[in-house]
Amino acid sequence: MSEHTMATGPLQGLRVLDISTMLAGPYGATLLGDLGADVIRVESHYGDESRHLGPERGTERGPYLSLNRNKRDIVIDLQQEDSREVFARLVATADVLITNIREPALSKLGLSYAQVATLKADIVWIGVTAFGPDGPYAGRPGIDFLAQGYAGVLALNGDPDGEPVRTGFPAVDVITSLLVANAAQAALRVRDRTGAGQRVEVSLLDSLMHAQASSIGTYLATGEAPVRTGNRSLYFAPSGVYPTRDGGHVVITTPGEKFFVKLCRALETDWDTDARFHDIAARLANQDELDRVVAQRTSAYTREELIPKLVAADVLTAPINQVEDVVHDPQILHNNMIVATEHPVLGEVRVTGVPIRFYATPGSVRLHPPLLGEHTRALLGELGYSAEEAAAMIRDGLVADNPEILARRKRK
């Protein structure tokens, strides 16, 4: 029994073709794979750009390893007409196709919705763009950083008196990946009812607008524009990052009177009876002084002393963890959000886990991030090609397996 047939999860039995690059599209396909779908990564001989960026581990790169678990990989040179038959056979077996290739390259490679639908009429085709498939920005290149600029996130992130700052992780790409996975499942639900596939479009810009309902939506409703607050809240205080005696920091936030009272009791103060701080309006008006006295009090403790004390008092608090702390956090480990998978070249590789917990049909990380072309021969066999035909296609450069990819790199 091959690895992919051992899939469990609510999407077991579905096949997804991932013909996208970098993050938003591939990570959406990854989530579908986490939930049991058989995800086939279709790459060129060069491979996804993320295979060439970031820190290295052996022959592989961190960004690709981190984003592409639960996939098999086939290399097809879609620029060659003779390779289109392989692609046509593969599409005929698929339920969903995800791509973020822009026009005119999309159509030149035979990947537009109209072209793919001639090969599989009920395909769910998902296109990921930066700004949308049409309109004044259509066709422009774009990434997470640009979307944050257009959608106003850069204007809201950072210290009030500082420069705009992008989010420290690719938030827009990750949000978009979730919408890609959600869109695929919704379109498949329609297909279950009607038998019809369809074209679906998801953009980074629209995803970020969706994520900003609380800020842009409030402006639309009230006319009051949000402002940059750093770690503070627009609506209550105290809320921020406070120092500890050992040079650490903790988050403390108090969205409501009861939490402020709990903070006062935990820190053994009577700030809640002080006229300057006795209600939310007063605390906001005297926020600089409030932050000063809170910081003075938290500085009396080490981080490891303070966090348990605040948690025991039901205060809303958290440590400011570094990455090396995060990967050892007991709750994250308990939630199986760091899992190990065996890589054929690198040995054990740890990746992030499945973020949705199904109790009856659980998903899992069952496949390592694939080598470029690792499953080409196996997939060609599944599509009905003989071993001799596969070897001939590899020799002619129509497709490639991983040994051929490595041989090409040595010849360069």
Image: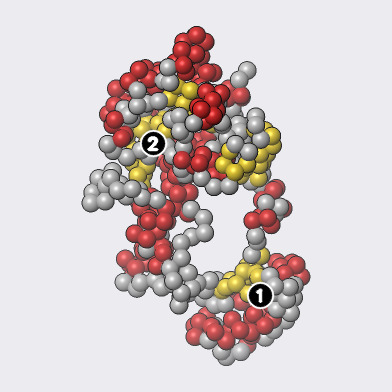
Can residue 397 be seen by looking at this rendering?
Answer: yes
Colouring convention used in this rendered image of the protein: secondary structure
Q: Which mark is residue 99?
A: 2
Name the residue rendered at 54%, 25% in the picture.
407
Q: Secondary structure at mark 1?
A: strand
Name the residue rendered at 37%, 56% in the picture.
146
Q: Secondary structure at mark 2?
A: strand
Question: Residue 63 placed where, x, y %?
Answer: 54, 44
Specify few, some or many for label 1: CA neighbours under 10 Å numbering under 14, 14-19, or 20 or more. Answer: many
Q: Is residue 68 above or below residue 79?
A: below
Q: Is residue 281 above or below residue 335?
A: below
Can residue 27 be seen by looking at this rendering?
Answer: no
Image quarter (top left, top right, bottom left or bottom right) of the N terminus: top right
Q: Which residue in the structure is indicated by mark 1?
A: 243
Q: Amino acid at mark 1?
A: Pro
Q: Amino acid at mark 2?
A: Thr
Between 4 and 225, which is closer to the camera in this rendering? 4
Please tell me in which quadrant of the rendered image residue 196 appears. top left
Question: Residue 293 placed where, x, y %?
Answer: 63, 84
Q: Is residue 173 above or below residue 322?
A: above
